[in-house]
Image (cartoon, coloured by chain):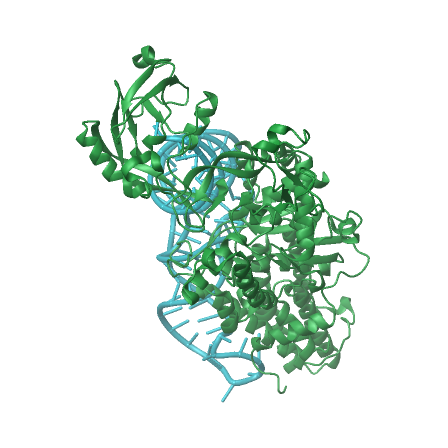
Chain colours: A green, B cyan
Amino acid sequence: MTEIPTRFDHTKEAEIYQKWEKAGEFKPKGSGEPFSIIIPPPNVTGDLHLGHALTYGLQDTVARHARRHGKKVLMVPGADHAAIAVQALVEKKIQKEKGLSRTQLGREKFLEEVQDWTAHYLPRVKESLKRFGLSADWGHFRFTMDEHSQLAVKTAFVELYEKKLIYRGEYLVNWDPKLQTAISDDEVLNEDRPAKLYWLKYGPLTVATSRPETQFGDVAIAVNPKDKRYEKYVGQEVEIVLATGQKKKLPVIADEFVDPEFGTGAVKITPAHDKNDFEAGQRHNLPVVQTIDKYGKLTDLAGEWAGLKALEAREPIVKKLEELGLVEKVTDYNARVAISERSGAIIEPLISTQWFMKTTELKDAALKAVKLGDIKFTPKNVEKVYFHWLNNLHDWCISRQLWWGHELPVWHCQNWSAKTKSQKSNPKNNEGFIVALEKPKVCPICGECAMEQDPDTLDTWFSAGLWPLATLGWPDKTAPDLKEYYPTSFLETGQDILFFWVARMIMMSQALTGEIPFKEVLFHGLILDDQGKKMSKSKGNTMDPLALIDKYGSDALRMSLIGGNSPGLPQRYTETKLLKYRNFVTKIWNAARFVASTGNSKSQIPNPKQLDETEKKFLEKLSRLEESNHKDFKTYKLGLALEELYEFFWHDFADQLLEYEKKVLLESADETRKAQAEAVLQDSLKRLLVLLSDFAPFLVTEINQTMFDA
RNA sequence: GGGCAAUUAACUCAGUGGUAGAGUGCUUCGUUCACAUCGAAGAAGUCGCUGGUUCGAAUCCAGCAUUGCCCACCA
């Protein structure tokens, strides 16, 4: 025995992966039932965390299991352009390296910088996926900004627009003043922060507000219709005095949304800068008066405070109001502040012209698919969260004022103006733009201009929502992959992107094809640090999965993340657990080394009738393990399947059977008996290695190749 | 304010109706003949609390407590 070392050299993993690829192991093979997995594409930010190791570990384990059970497996790899995230990073980079903002650099140059960025990070992303051992077919690799993806996105946009599921309009949106773009509701985080509530005298009434600086945009005062205190004012106008000293008349309206218990029960209405007020304004036909611009600064309406940032102007304005005797009191208050998930900036609700998807019309089909069980969620309780979200859904703002992202297939007439509009030169088009895959040669609106493409880009999640379709060849409806692998079989992802991604894929797929995008979804939970705290860069408690792979090996990391964990539950990362599975890798390696040393007869167990009780019991138990392993996979109890495998291999196989047969080999004089012992050991080991190959593919491949020439 | 989950050995977690399990740690012993990243034996838990269903509950139901996560238009 030989030159085989006493431990598995995990630095060989890259080499093993290359062998797999060369042998075409991950190409869909055979005539089995198609089983397709589209991986959640990691961002080209160059940022991989333990969650990636977990999700790719889980889905690869499922893929390998399906493959060895005769399925024709297609696993599609890819990467996401991550518009807002990458743009923010590149902006930071050029600011640091060149001292330039993106506007100083210009759109074209900026996009070149982004191209450089992706050119640098795409290969790294691919490399990382390979280090996780992902058994994906690289011939199917897709980037969300590649040519085909762009065609899919444009086609989807045009089709959805034609189905009237996409519309353009002027509404109050979440504006990120730092990134200078609108963002969707899902990209906004709410934080409770201590704040002040200002009780301002508005004519004969008092209103309580947390944002006195928006008073220049006030257009009404609202009270609850059932509130007797204010009955006599409803329908009347009251005259108020602003901080500028100007007088202004505001109508008093009655609306159910006003809580009589809060504050004075009277609330100032600023439709341009508050979501509630905007909606109330629409109900009551009130004008929208903007007093904060897209840079978060006060407009001319604010008189001497014009040009100041809203927050900076607050105290001076209050001071002035106090001097005018218009502040009744100031109280402490816990305000909820809307924060941009990506930039951390305080969101400014802003009226602007944006593109929206009518998700409200798509939700019924999305609800139905899960309710009827066409799409199955594991764990099942995720369904409730999904239903709740869908039932409270608002239309989705899909346009972004970013530069990096999919451009809209929208073409504006350059001669379009109020004048053209009034002439009604083209009664069919009263918006000044058309939506089409290609830019028209001649403007169909004015008949002469060259038309200009809409400067906006799309929310990253728009292209992500098309991912299962785009990766399989759509919009070519006759694409062979689409026919064979769509709807896809299985999706594994984090619960944190249930709304962002999973729900949108379901809605968009159904809107475009009438079909669901996938049949099964497995959700994993958050990975926490060893203190049970959420991992985040700012806390500095993140772990680099690639560094852990360098140190302990990919198989060990994968098993440590999967083993003994229930579907969907959060788990703590501990080095102890990683060591447990690293030791398991060594144990398997050495048990195999021993069995290989007993000879390499490929013989089957000679005569099952000659087996003694110990052997029979062991083999029966092994059969039961194989059954329960397969059963556990069907319900995605991979953590349990692996733990059982661990227990069985270590204690039943290595500690019991192996020691038992070792004794036979050392002490028995009966050559037939010895041959039987060898055969039982080899047969059992090989069956166990098959089960282990789902979880520890690198290790099992190396064992088979170095010890059993298989 | 609403929703979802978790609570099991000192620590990290499995276990979902039938006499409590693993890894780490701890105690004792063994072993250079696959593996010290080893083996054998052991100590250690009234399975958060209170009720209920059941022949039988860590497991099912109700309530409570604590912790975590998600959602939400009281300005």
Quadrant of the snapshot with the N terminus of chain A = bottom right
* Residue A489 visible, this angle: no
Residue A657 position in % (x across, y down): 62, 70
> Which is more toward the observer, A315 or A560?
A315
Q: Relative to A701, is A672 on the left or the right?
A: right
Which residue is at the front of the view, B31 or A279?
A: A279
In x, y percent, where is residue A116? 55, 66
Q: Residue furthest right?
A: A31
The image position of residue A580, as x and y in percent, is 49, 67
Q: Is residue A260 above or below residue A546?
A: above
Q: Position of residue A106 (x, y in %)?
A: 50, 57
Q: Residue at x 34, y 16 (%)?
A: A237
Q: Residue at x 29, y 39 (%)?
A: A305
Q: Quadrant of residue A373?
A: top right
**Residue placed at 73% from the left, 67% from the top?**
A25
Splitting the image into 4 quarters, where does residue A216 fall? Answer: top left
Q: Quadrant of the C terminus of chain A?
A: bottom right
Between A142 and A318, the one nearer to me in the picture: A318
In the foreground, A186 or A314: A314
Residue A108 vs residue A488: left or right?
A: left
